Image (cartoon, coloured by chain):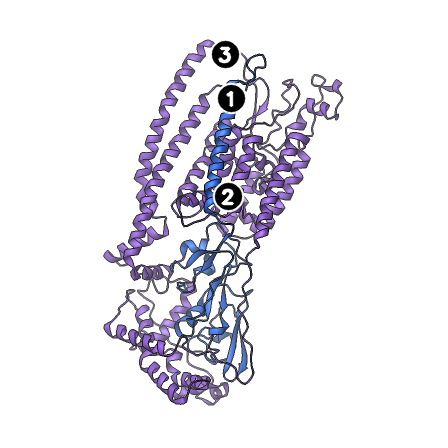
Amino acid sequence: MNRLLQRSRHEEALSQSDGSTRPPSPQPARSGRGRIPRRFQKCRELETIVEGPANQKPAMRHSLSLNLPLVAADLRRRRGLGVSRVRLLTSAATALGFKARTAVWRNFSSRGGSVRASLATITLLFLLLFACSALADQRFPPPDFSETNHELPTTTTPPVRALWLHYLDVAVLLGAMGLAVWFIYRKRSRRGLFWLSIFSLAYFGFWRKGCVCAIGAPQNVILGLFDPNYTVPLVVTAFFIIPLVFALFAGRAFCSGVCPHGALQDLVLVKPVKVPAWLEHTLGVIPFLFLGFGLAFAATGTGFPICRYDPIVPIFRLNGPSLLVALAAATLLIGMFVGRPYCRFLCPYGALLKVAALASKWRVRVTPDICTQCQLCEHSCPFGAMREPTPGTVEPKLLVPERRRLGWLVLLVPVLIAGGVWIGGQLAVPMAKLNPTVELAERYLAQKTAPVDYGVMTPEALSLQRAEHDPEALLLAAANWRERFKLACLLFGGWVGLVLGIKLVSLSLRTRRTDFEPDRGACFACARCFRSCPQELVRIGQMPASELPGTGVAPQTAKT
Amino acid sequence: MTENPTNDPTSRRTFLRNGARIAAMTGLGALGGVLAGRSNADAWVWQIDPQKCVRCGNCATECVLEQSAVKCVHSYAICGYCNLCTGYFEPEPNALTTAAENQLCPTAAIRRTFIEDPYYEYSIDEDLCIGCAKCVEGCTRFGNGSLFLQIRHDRCVRCNECAIARTCPGDAFRRVPASQPYLLKETH
């Protein structure tokens, strides 16, 4: 004790004491402890010091416990505490506080993993509480620096982004949407859309780092509807509604030049390959399922998977978990050969826009003039959205089996929905484990029957301690979450059935087209097809009318 | 799509489309109304409740940023300015010096400055701090608890769903209004 006191009081005292070096603390036997992450090794060392080596009797060996006289000296120096009071306090602390704290610490990190709260410890804890109240709020009264008049620094609090900047985001969104519509329908300019998308990529992508974005907004909206405690910020509501309203009138103008995700993928597109129709249709279902999945998760307070597993945002942040960065790299790599893979086969907001665009007032046309069906635009679309004219007449014999098939498929839709609901109901309980509260409650109950050693100070062990604090509240909350999960899983199952059913029905519907035209839902309004049309080139005066198809001149200016 | 100009100017498809659009607009309007009624202009940000923090170390590793947006901050007003700071020094330090082997902080992000005998001031270098909470553990368990973790809003990218909040064993993360974005400690 004396030795340590001398050493720690002053640095010169250290050199006077029994030597400048100290034998290293013996390491305890590490068997039977389970795996402990590296970041907790410091805690392990602390625990070793408190407990002493495994082969010795546990002893109070933390430096603080050993340095009580030092603490007393420290306290005595602080103004406002007379020597007698300090003595009283330190003796009280010696008798109760530090022993109790060490006991708690030792119990807390005891070998069995469970807390052995002995009666003595509890008594000591209570006494410690009294001692603490006697010591006012702080264990070590803050000094008032009578000698140096030292001014206390203030804790810095870097401000949150100012509110007006968020409204600026909405204004920029509105402006960009308006510009996009103007470029698509009035200017019919691929170049304008290209520069607009570069701006959006810079502003919404790299400057705003992908947040706030419309793609994740449906989750906030659904959580706002389901959870009365969660209020959706107005900015997020605006980002959710504005692109949808535009889509109802002008198609997917948001995708064409405003969404940074689309802009980035548009930029890396080098050599688009045509995705086979069957694959396009199959993968095209995923956005709808992902939308349902994201909404179900958000509504049950389990997380926002659309944001969490976004494969583009790590690029905007130039930062992120390695798995997601790898996913982002893969998306861009695929995006070099498959046009906009994220937009077409994953984006859940794109699914919403697709449905809205089906009802749009105006539509993107390859040419506002008469289509001569020259087929030059057919391969200009890198996203597989160009639809060719259907044959004018239909063989009447073929109509009957087609109608019959359509009838069966329409009947199949409710069956699929019912099946989805049933499967969803079966999955409700296992899926609920994804909710952190439910997971903790289940682990807490499992711990009661078959204890698992989670190690010392691991997040798992710490969360279990929280559970033991108030098990009833936790179990009640978990039961509530599970109820909500049940509803969400039933709805999600039904949604999956509905999506698959509608997809099957839509494949059997016969649409009549007389011209080449972009599909309303699938078209991103990128304006690539405009300049592939000779009529368009004649209209804007880039080609004499005498060179219209038939003369063998194929315009090459599909890309900017 | 066929729009037959010789027949009725409104084809069946156009009629259906118009109906769907009006219905969708009404729905979006209603949704916007409900949300606007419930929402407030103030945005929400994530923050750590220091009283609930269990110092597990997840903040250093779970953040979506490579260098976590969670940093240790210091409430100087409740700091004891101890010479033997349990947030700064290793347990049983060789000496009470700033030598690296004595420091608890893995990145030496805490600066120790002599003020007057026997008081030392401790401040955090946020560029070095990784939010591992080792100092917070030492200070809270044995000291005044003036060191604690906070999300720094100049670094936080405000994920919709905070990746740390999801795994926080103490359930210490919560959304707070952006007008009061910090939960600073004023007592132990």
Q: Are marks 3 and 1 in contact (CB under 8 Å)?
A: no
Q: Is residue A488 left or right of residue A249?
A: left
Please tell me in which quadrant of the rendered image residue A258 appears. top right
Nearest to viewer (mark 3 / mark 1): 1
Name chain B's colour.
Answer: blue
**Residue A76 percent coordinates (x, y):** 43, 86
| Chain appearing in purple on the rendered image | A
* Observer-nearest of B53 and B177: B177
Q: CA distance from mark 2 to mark 1?
A: 29 Å
Label 2: state its secondary structure. helix
Q: Residue A237 has which mark?
A: 2
Residue that appears at 41% across and 53% down: B166
Task: Say whether mark 1 and mark 2 are on the same chain.
Answer: no
Q: Is residue B141 left or right of residue B101?
A: left
Q: CA distance from mark 3 to mark 1?
A: 25 Å
Q: Which chain is mark 2 on? A: A
According to the picture, the residue beneath numbered tag 1 turns out to be B15
Judge whether A210 appears above or below B100 on screen. Answer: above
Within-10-Å neighbours for mark 2: few <14, some 14–19, many 20+? many
Label 1: state its secondary structure. helix
The kind of residue tagged 3 is: Val
- From where the camera sits, is residue A5 visible? yes
Nearest to viewer (mark 2 / mark 3): 2
**Residue A321 percent coordinates (x, y):** 49, 52
Within-10-Å neighbours for mark 1: few <14, some 14–19, many 20+? few
According to the picture, the residue beneath numbered tag 3 turns out to be A394
Q: Which chain is mark 1 on? A: B
The kind of residue tagged 2 is: Thr
